[in-house]
Amino acid sequence: MTERIVIATELPAAYQAMFGLEKYLGTTSISKSLKELIKIRASQINGCAFCINMHTKDARELGETEQRIYALSAWRDTRYFTEAERAVLALTEAVTLITKEHVPDAIYEDVARYFDSKQVGEIIMAIVTINAWNRIAISTNMMPE
């Protein structure tokens, strides 16, 4: 499979706008580790090999354990994640699969138990951003390095 188009080359302003979202996310109060879990889980759901490869490496560099990374796709069936992380993972799945049930009130309310409204917004922006990156990588056939 070959890359179809290099968005960064063909549409540099659009690519820089996406990096603007990443830059913003770097300033949020959500932990880097939690943001990587969001990125990995959404990328697993979307089947984005490029992003899974990138974000599992990034998570390891932040000290994330192999056990938690490997179990992430089955997080509901483990005890490896805190209640707050579990709430965020459920929200990540709901937003990523938004056409399935939209975002049920119970999932939103669970996240709001652990995070204030600004942080919930930051989490939603992290989920939305990785979903956009996934769609860019998948539609252009970006390959993991």
Image (spheres, helix red, strand yellow):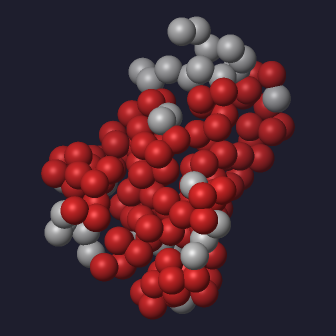
Please say whether residue 73 is visible from this viewpoint. Answer: yes
Q: How many callouts does the rendering have?
A: 0
- Residue 29 in percent (x, y) is at 51, 75
The image shows residue 60, relative to residue 54, as above or below, that is below
Identify which residue is drawn at 34% across, 43% down.
Answer: 56
Which residue does the image show at 54% across and 63% down from the upper left? 94
Height in image: 136 above or below 43? Answer: above
Q: Percent x, y for residue 122?
A: 59, 71
Where is the N terminus found, in terms of image quarters?
top right
Quadrant of res 36: bottom left
Instruction: Classify residue 34 as left or right of residue 103.
Output: left
Check the image and name the residue furthest to the front: 100
Residue at the far top: name it: 2
Work out whether residue 115 can be spotted.
no
Is 89 located above or below residue 118 in the figure? above
Pinpoint residue 24: horizontal percent, then vertical percent: 65, 62
Q: Nearer the viewer, residue 137 or 32?
A: 137
The picture quadrant where one finds residue 28 is bottom right
